[in-house]
Image (cartoon, rainbow, N blue to C red):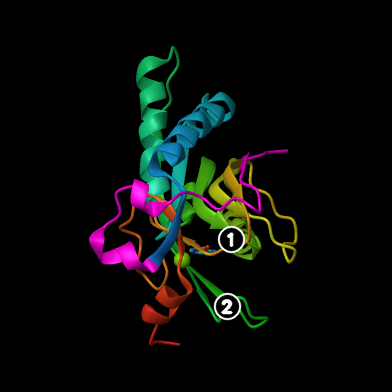
């Protein structure tokens, strides 16, 4: 079973004043939780693990938008580096899918999946996701993917949350296993804000009020 880098429940992260943070977000963040450099280092190793398992065939890397785009780009850079410098190499092509969930975290949660999946028929697909909390979204995506009969599907998620509500879905590759705290940065957002922040950080409570969505 896959294990990510474990970040303990009591981990408080790092003093944000010791890092470079965009001025416009300085007062909104509590702490730096996972520094950008650590994300990249862990991603480099994930790339190696993935290539070890999938590196014998053409890979279709499927990015789950929007939150997955930074991880996707950096993971593919590392995979390309392995293709360039290793003794074997495989073609990588890319595809994108957009997932939106409405009435999040409620029993009436609805998940909509936008993207062309029929091209994945017969392919080795690597789904690249930013964060898995309950696994419901990923299960919905995987069931839709299976309808298109890919040859193989593997899932890599940068983050997975330890939650008591989780039905226990675990992806094939995990970057970090984190406590059930709300995090932003590195393309993870709060109402579309904070994607433009390199480090994964913890929001201040009052920032949630400040950036509260006016569409519900
Ligand atoms: N941050 C951003 N998006 C999310 C999170 C989070 O902590 N959990 C689920 N989606
Ligand atoms: Mg999001």
Q: Give the quadrant of residue 91.
A: top left
Q: Nearer the viewer, residue 122 or 134?
A: 134
At 45% from the left and 31% from the top, the residue drawn is: 44
**Element type at marker 2?**
strand
**Residue 85 at x, y percent in the picture:** 37, 16
**Residue 9 at x, y percent in the picture:** 66, 54
**Left or right: residue 140 compared with residue 115:** right
At 45% from the left and 38% from the top, the residue drawn is: 38
Q: Nearer the viewer, residue 34 or 118?
A: 34
Q: CA distance from mark 1 to mark 2?
A: 14 Å
Q: Give the quadrant of residue 142.
A: bottom right
Q: Which residues are magenta?
A: 1-28
Q: Relative to residue 65, is residue 92 depicted above or below?
A: above
Mark 1 neighbour class, 10 Å CA radius: few under 14, some 14 to 19, many 20 or more:
few
* Image quarter in which the C terminus is found: bottom left
**Left or right: residue 52 compared with residue 8:** left
**Left or right: residue 116 compared with residue 147:** left
**Residue 106 at x, y percent in the picture:** 64, 80
Whether disc 1's CB lies below 8 Å from ligand 2 is answered: no
**Element type at marker 1?**
helix
**Left or right: residue 99 compared with residue 151:** left
What number is the disc on residue 144? Answer: 1
Sequence-wise, the earlier of marks 1 and 2 is 2
Front of the two marks 1 and 2: 2
Residue placed under numbered mark 2 in the picture: 110
């Amino acid at each position: 079973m896959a294990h990510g880098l474990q970040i303990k429940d009591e981990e408080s992260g790092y003093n944000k004043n010791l890092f470079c943070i965009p001025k416009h977000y300085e007062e909104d963040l509590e702490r730096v939780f996972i520094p950008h450099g650590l994300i990249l280092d862990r991603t480099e190793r994930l790339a190696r693990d993935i290539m070890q398992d999938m590196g014998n065939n053409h890979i279709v890397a499927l990015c789950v938008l929007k939150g997955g785009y930074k991880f996707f780009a950096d993971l593919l850079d590392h995979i390309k580096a392995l293709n360039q410098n290793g003794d074997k190499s495989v073609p990588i092509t890319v595809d994108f899918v957009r997932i939106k969930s409405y009435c999040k975290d409620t029993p009436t949660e609805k998940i909509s999946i936008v993207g062309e999946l029929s091209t994945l028929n017969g392919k080795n697909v690597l789904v690249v996701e930013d964060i898995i909390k309950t696994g419901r979204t990923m299960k919905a995506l995987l069931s839709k993917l299976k309808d298109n009969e890919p040859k193989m599907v593997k899932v890599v998620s940068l983050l997975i949350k330890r939650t008591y509500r989780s039905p226990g879905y675990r992806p094939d590759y995990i970057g970090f296993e984190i406590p059930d705290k709300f995090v932003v940065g590195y393309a993870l957002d709060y109402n579309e804000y904070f994607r433009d922040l390199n480090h994964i950080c913890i929001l201040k409570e009052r920032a949630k009020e400040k950036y509260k969505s006016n569409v519900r």
